[in-house]
């Protein structure tokens, strides 16, 4: 067995908008936990929101798209998990198995589940503790950089499409061609759906078509909803953005019995005329990532269908640069931190992630 290092490098937030590069003592996993040696961790918009959130309990290590290998097992961990096994951890940190939702098998809605990067430390680090019930097995065909974004952007859009009610041959619209949207386009195309991508401006059009869209709609130049109606109406709208006004506008392009699947969490209420829903039996639903089992299905589908995230990689110590690139909208389409830099003693230093 490889001897564990006594310390590991990590990035943690110590104040709103600030990160600190530190060296921490390597912990031992408690009952039902494993210790991971992290190989890569995706950078998500939710990470940026967590880091900027004044209410976040600090210090906290961000990151909820972590992929690595099990280095140590705590007491009572299921025998399926082995030392050296490749695993991942997403936003949901492992169900309790005892609450009302767990008793119904709704593990992603567990009432006692830690939120990785918020209520427990995440993957912007070389080592990470995780609940065994939150572990996801990583297919051999995927490297850590490819697998990491699928633990959030991948499973979120994969499950939203599966829950949308759309069937092969139906028209599905993807609103927002970013970190989530670029995965939704690939999955939808490979599920046999007719795919309309809705974005702002033509700079993203070629990418959207290459990723799987049959049609690109520039909402700056035309009424996206009317374009969808001219095509017969969308059976599903996968809304990946937080602009609720834009979501409300695009919803008008739904066919009767069409469904809007909300993935972006906007601050403003969503305006939906009741008559529009009632008159056409249309629905609006939220979709919250997925269980470890569902995430493994998303990973395996990604392998089978060759639907992979487009990623840019940066070393752990450049986490602030990764977040700035994400916030600016310059990243195509996900940024992933890697942990393979040389281990050198590091003095704590602060990094400002505000982009004003």
Image (spheres, grey):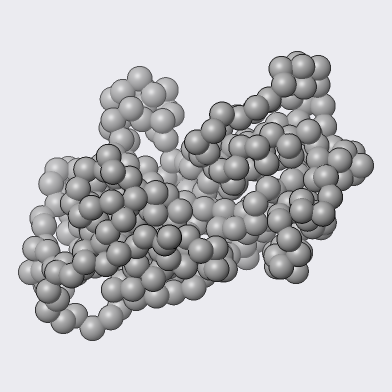
Tell which of 234 and 88 is nearer to you.
234
Of the pair 186 and 336, the residue shown nearer to us: 336
Residue 245 in view, yes or no? yes
Q: Looking at the figure, which quarter contains the N terminus?
A: bottom left
Residue 59, position in %: x, y? 18, 51
The quarter of the rendered structure image containing the C terminus is: bottom left
Residue drawn at (24%, 46%) of the image: 120
One can see residue 159 in this view: no
Count numbered badges in the picture: 0
Q: Position of residue 158 (x, y in %)?
A: 59, 47
Horizontal and vertical percent position of residue 285: 60, 29
> Is 306 positioned to the left or the right of 60 in the image?
right
Which residue is rendered at x = 55% and y = 58% of the image?
179
Quadrant in the rendering for residue 4: bottom left
Q: Residue furthest front?
A: 356
Q: Residue at x 28, y 51 (%)?
A: 16
* Residue at the (54%, 33%) spot, across then down: 268
Up/down of 146 relative to 91, above or below: below
Q: Up-down: is 180 above or below 99?
A: below
Question: Position of 67 compared to 228: left or right?
Answer: left
Which of 91/169 is in front? Answer: 91
Q: Nearer the viewer, residue 313 or 329?
A: 329
Q: What is the x, y in percent for residue 70?
A: 25, 61
Q: Is residue 286 left or right of residue 72?
A: right
**Residue 288 falls left or right of residue 55:** right
Q: Is residue 111 above or below residue 227?
A: above
- Asked where in the image residue 221 lies, by quadrant, the reply is bottom right
């Amino acid at each position: 067995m490889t001897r564990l290092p006594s310390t590991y490098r990590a990035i943690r937030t110590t104040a709103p908008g600030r990160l600190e590069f530190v060296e921490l003592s390597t912990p031992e996993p408690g009952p039902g936990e494993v210790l991971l040696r992290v190989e890569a961790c995706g950078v998500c918009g939710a990470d940026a929101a967590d880091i900027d959130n004044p209410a976040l309990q600090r210090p906290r290590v961000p990151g909820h798209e972590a992929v690595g290998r099990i280095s140590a097992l705590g007491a009572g961990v299921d025998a399926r998990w082995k030392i050296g096994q490749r695993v991942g951890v997403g936003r949901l940190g492992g169900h309790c198995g005892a609450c009302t939702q767990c008793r119904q098998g709704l593990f992603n809605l567990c009432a006692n589940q830690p939120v990785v990067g918020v209520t427990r430390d995440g993957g912007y680090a070389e080592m990470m503790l995780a609940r065994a019930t939150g572990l996801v097995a990583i297919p051999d065909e995927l490297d850590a950089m490819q697998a990491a974004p699928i633990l959030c952007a991948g499973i979120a859009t994969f499950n939203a499409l599966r829950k949308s009610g759309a069937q092969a041959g139906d028209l599905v619209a993807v609103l927002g061609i970013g970190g989530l949207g670029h995965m939704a386009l690939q999955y939808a195309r490979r599920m046999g759906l007719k795919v309309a991508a809705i974005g702002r401006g033509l700079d993203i059009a070629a990418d959207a078509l290459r990723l799987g869209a049959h049609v690109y709609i520039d909402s700056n130049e035309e009424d996206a909803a009317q374009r969808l109606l001219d095509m017969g109406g969308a059976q599903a709208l996968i809304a990946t953005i937080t602009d609720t006004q834009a979501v409300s506008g695009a919803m008008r392009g739904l066919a009767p019995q069409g469904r809007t699947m909300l993935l972006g969490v906007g601050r403003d209420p969503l305006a939906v005329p009741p008559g529009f829903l009632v008159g056409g039996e249309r629905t609006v639903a939220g979709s919250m990532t997925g269980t470890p089992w569902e995430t493994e299905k998303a990973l395996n589908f990604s392998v089978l269908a060759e639907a992979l995230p487009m990623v840019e990689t940066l070393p752990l110590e450049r986490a602030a640069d990764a977040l700035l690139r994400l916030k600016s909208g310059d990243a195509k389409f996900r940024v992933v931190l890697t942990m393979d830099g040389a281990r050198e003693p590091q003095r704590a230093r602060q990094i400002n992630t505000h982009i004003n």
